[in-house]
Structures are given as C-alpha cells and as structure tokens.
Image: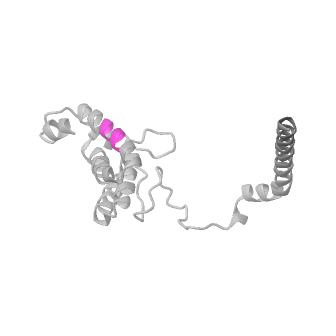
Amino acid sequence: RLLWETHGITGSLSQLQIYLLLDKINDMLGNLARWNDDYVPMAAGYAEVLATHSVYCWDHYAVHPGESSCFNEAVANAMSYYRRANDDESTRRVLLAANQHPHAMTHWKLIDQTPRIFYPDLKTQPWWDETKFSTVATLISHFQQSKQAILKEIQGLKKLAKSQIQAMHDTSE
C-alpha cells in the first residue's frame, strides 16, 4: 500500500507498474477479506482503483468467456466487496463505471448482478422453473436408484462396524 500511496497516486509509475502493483495489492486484500471483514472496504477500494486507474486493466476486458478480463473481474470484485461493506453509494459508482466501458460485457442493470460476462438476454430471477432444465429431469430420474445404492453402502458399513465392535467385545471378555 505504501508504494501505491507514495508513488502510484503521484503519477511517478508507468502504466505497467501501476497495473502490477494494484494487481498484487488486490490479490493480497482479496485473501485477507475472505477471512476478516475489516479488510472488505479496503479490498473494494483497491479493486475499483485497479479497474478505473489502470490503463492495462481497462484495455483487458472480456466480451466472451475465456478472454482476458482484468476489467470485468475488477469491477465485479469491487461491487461484491462494496455490497459486503453495505456501501450502496460506492457500489452504484462502480456500476456506472462498468456500464460506461465501451466494450466490456459489464453493462449490468442491477447492483447485485455481477457475472464476469453479462448476457443482457439472460433473465435475472432468484428461482427457476426446474422443468426448463434437462439436468433436473435426469437427476430426478436417477434419484431412487442412487438413493438405494447409497443406502446399501451405508448398511454395509453399519454391519461392518457392528461386527468389529462385537469382535472387540468378544476379545475383551
């Protein structure tokens, strides 16, 4: 952080140095924020800075899965961290930045809608009708068979455990 606060803000670093420094800070803060909420606001701020102040990150955006996506990930991370910190104002500011990118697929409509690649025609809804997904039908059709196989395995383990307990009891007498 000291490097960024001393040299990054003053403009004395090259664009590549800015990216490398902010990227490493984000890696560190992301891990810290997973374990300690005290780091969440700082992680949010540095993710936002990475997306908005790094020319390298701005230029590396994703339109399709598999593409380099520094910008997409940085704005999605910033918004997620700001939401965790209950900072709606900052979340909306990053949403605006995401929507202003001319090419990145980050033109989200809602502050809690931050997939790495945004598909505008994909509906946002908390629950889906399971009949619309073939995987659900497959899982349901195999449920009883799988359930019976698992119960059979559990019964086998119970019998084995019971026989071992009985054998230990018999040898102790």
Magenta stretch, residue numbers: 23-29
x then y, percent, for residue 42: 28, 50
Quadrant housing the C terminus: top right
* Front-most of residues 31 and 125: 31
x then y, percent, for residue 117: 48, 50
Question: In this figure, which colouring scheme has been used for the structure?
Answer: one colour
At a point 29% along the width and 33% down the height, the residue shown is 20
Q: Is residue 103 among the parts visible in the rendering? A: no
Q: Which image quadrant for residue 50? A: top left
x then y, percent, for residue 143: 81, 56
User: In the picture provided, is 118 more to the left or to the right than 70?
Assistant: right
At a point 42% along the width and 65% down the height, the residue shown is 110
Residue 42 is inside the magenta segment: no
At a point 18% along the width and 35% down the height, the residue shown is 3
Quadrant housing the N terminus: top left
Question: Which secondary structure dominates the residues rendered in magenta?
Answer: helix
At a point 28% along the width and 61% down the height, the residue shown is 90
* Front-most of residues 45 and 29: 29
User: In the picture provided, is 151 more to the left or to the right than 128?
Assistant: right
Q: Is residue 89 among the parts visible in the rendering? A: yes
Q: Which image quadrant for residue 123? A: bottom right
**Above or below for 77 versus 69:** below
Q: How many marks?
A: 0
Identity of the residue furthest to the front in this view: 173
Residue 26 is inside the magenta segment: yes
User: In the picture provided, is 168 more to the left or to the right than 133?
Assistant: right
* Front-most of residues 101 and 51: 51
Q: Which image quadrant for residue 140? A: bottom right
